[in-house]
Amino acid sequence: MLTGLPSFVLMPFAFALFCLNLAFSGTLVFLGGLLKTLIPIKHFHYLLHRPMHTVYRLWTYNNTLILRLINRVEWQVNGAENLSKDAWYLILANHQSWLDILVIAEVARQHTPEPKFFLKESLRKVPFLGMACWALNMPFMKRYSKAFIEKHPHLKGQDIETTKKSCQSFRDHPTTIINFVEGTRFTKSKHEKQQSPFNYLLKPKAGGIAFTLATLGEQFDKVLNVTLLYPDNPGHVMKDMLKGKLGKIVVNIEAIDIEQAMIGDYFDDVGFKESFQLWLNQQWQEKDQLIHQLYCQHEQEQVLETQVNQHRSV
């Protein structure tokens, strides 16, 4: 473990390790994607699925090794006991840091099928990452403001078409589809700008989730409501991790049965749209309360640990 090294040494070293891992795994996965493009035969694509996703899992495993190498990190994962790698899941998660991607990928590596993220279009241009995600059929989403859509109405619904095409490709193999429902990482400035009704979360966006359930609802085994928390690192989590100062990682998983009332036409059925938004906001309200409880629990554990250490030193 390298946590004793100063930050100015540890940060570039850790960053280099993560980049090398991404370059190695991303290149191998991209070559598989290139073969799929050059040889458009479905059975051949099926044969490539396992080796490409094995490399994907290797990337995740190596990331976790690097994280443990530079941090004395404690993992607390609740609710993963009954998950299966042979099932289809839809994950709804809050978004605190870029580290969320590595954390969810590691939990999925151990308990569920390979995760597929809904990614911002800008990530397509990131070296190795963008081309690997393209090869793994992850959807890249373009988000437009209301003002932009008003000026370019032909672009309305483009994200929905991207979601539809991606969901169709996920039918062939057990898949974990991940959507950071808030659409962006949590910051205090974003929280204030949104005037979010939640203490620890941004407002959830319902459209993409509702459409995914409408497209693949009957194939999903469960919706997984995932809550991510880094109670020792309330600031810039990714930077703390690179400095070797990451503490506890909390992942809470609530498995939700998919009911018929959760599947409907979000864009043309006003009644369903309102009920689905109400359901999602209720999930976010409970998630907000859970985060508060986890923070309180962590503070109590720290107080108890301090008392035990003081008693031992006497």
Image (cartoon, rainbow, N blue to C red):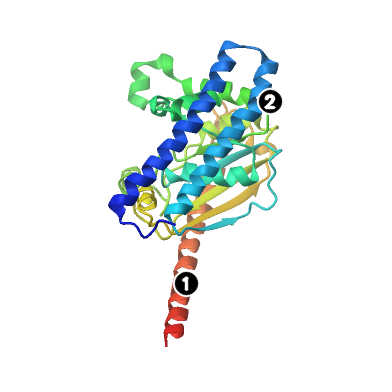
| Residue depicted at 48% across the width and 71% down the height | 301
Say what secondary structure mark 2 lies in.
loop
Q: Nearer the viewer, residue 218 or 119?
A: 119
Total tally of numbered discs in the picture: 2
User: Vertically, is 186 above or below 44?
Assistant: below
Q: Quadrant of the N terminus?
A: bottom left
Q: Amino acid at mark 1?
A: Gln
Q: CA distance from mark 1 to mark 2?
A: 46 Å
| Residue depicted at 37% across the width and 40% down the height | 16
Q: Nearer the viewer, residue 45 or 81?
A: 45
Label pair 1/2, CB-CB below 8 angstroms:
no
Residue denoted by label 1: 300
User: Vertically, is 1 above or below 117?
Assistant: below
Residue denoted by label 2: 172
| Residue 83 locus on image (x, y percent) | 68, 47
Which residue, as the protein is rendered here, is positioned at the far left?
A: 8
Which residue, as the protein is rendered here, is positioned at the far bottom?
A: 314
Q: Quadrant of residue 109?
A: top right
| Residue 88 locus on image (x, y percent) | 67, 36
Q: Residues within 10 Å of mark 2 (few under 14, many from 20)?
A: few
Q: Is residue 9 visible?
A: yes
Q: Earlier in the sequence, mark 1 or mark 2?
A: 2
